[in-house]
Amino acid sequence: MIIVGLLAATLTTSAFLPQMIKTWRTKSAKDVSYTMLITFIIGIFLWLIYGILRKDIAIILANAFTLLFNLTILYLKIKYGRTPQSKRL
Amino acid sequence: MIIVGLLAATLTTSAFLPQMIKTWRTKSAKDVSYTMLITFIIGIFLWLIYGILRKDIAIILANAFTLLFNLTILYLKIKYGRTPQSKRL
């Protein structure tokens, strides 16, 4: 059972790596919604608390890394959102 | 404890709604990575199985809805990815 959880954790967590790399390469994240990112970050933080309360290592690991990656995507979006290119939209 | 889980589930699930709406409105999802989407969809499916195995209603509900929303984003990305505008990148 824990194998399924850890595999799920690895996949959903690592899914944010290509997004992070793509954002960095294209220097653009205008199609990634701010509302999504911030709602998601708060939600992930709550999942982390839930995982700790339930002593569920799959939930704890998944959400600790997902939180870190999404905070990085948010930072990149804020950084690149200030360049003139983003004013096209 | 279940309240924290359900609140977390509501936030991480509903985070995909604005992304879905944004993709539909801008008719563009080129900044949303395919690799991310597909890895994420497989991961979410495994979380759903994990939730069923652990009989964890917060995990089951969160992942059932997240799966549905992400399949919709994937569909929109495939659909809009075929328009000439996307050939700029």
Image (cartoon, coloured by chain):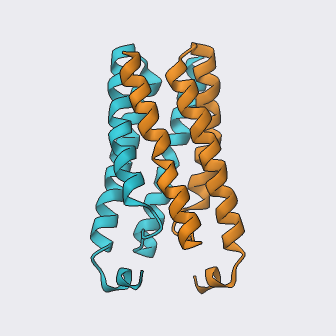
Chain colours: A orange, B cyan
Q: Position of residue A84 (x, y in %)?
A: 68, 84
Q: Nearer the viewer, residue A34 or A79?
A: A79
Q: Residue at x 62, y 15 (%)?
A: A53
Taking A48 as reference, is B74 above or below it?
A: below
Q: Position of residue B32 (x, y in %)?
A: 45, 62
Quick one: quadrant of the N terminus of chain A?
top left
Label total for image: 0
Taking A54 as reference, is A73 above or below it?
A: below
Taking B88 as reference, is A42 above or below it?
A: above
Q: Quadrant of residue B8?
A: top right
Q: Residue at x 53, y 28 (%)?
A: B6
Q: Position of residue A10 (x, y in %)?
A: 45, 34
Determine whether, in the image, residue B47 is placed left or right of residue B4.
left
Q: Quadrant of residue A25?
A: bottom right
Q: Quadrant of residue B59?
A: top left
Q: Position of residue A14 (x, y in %)?
A: 47, 43
Q: Residue at x 70, y 65 (%)?
A: A78
Q: Nearer the viewer, residue B65 or A67?
A: A67
Is residue B14 visible in the rendered image? The answer is: yes
Is residue A29 visible in the rendered image? The answer is: no
Q: Residue at x 33, y 58 (%)?
A: B74
Quick one: quadrant of the C terminus of chain A?
bottom right
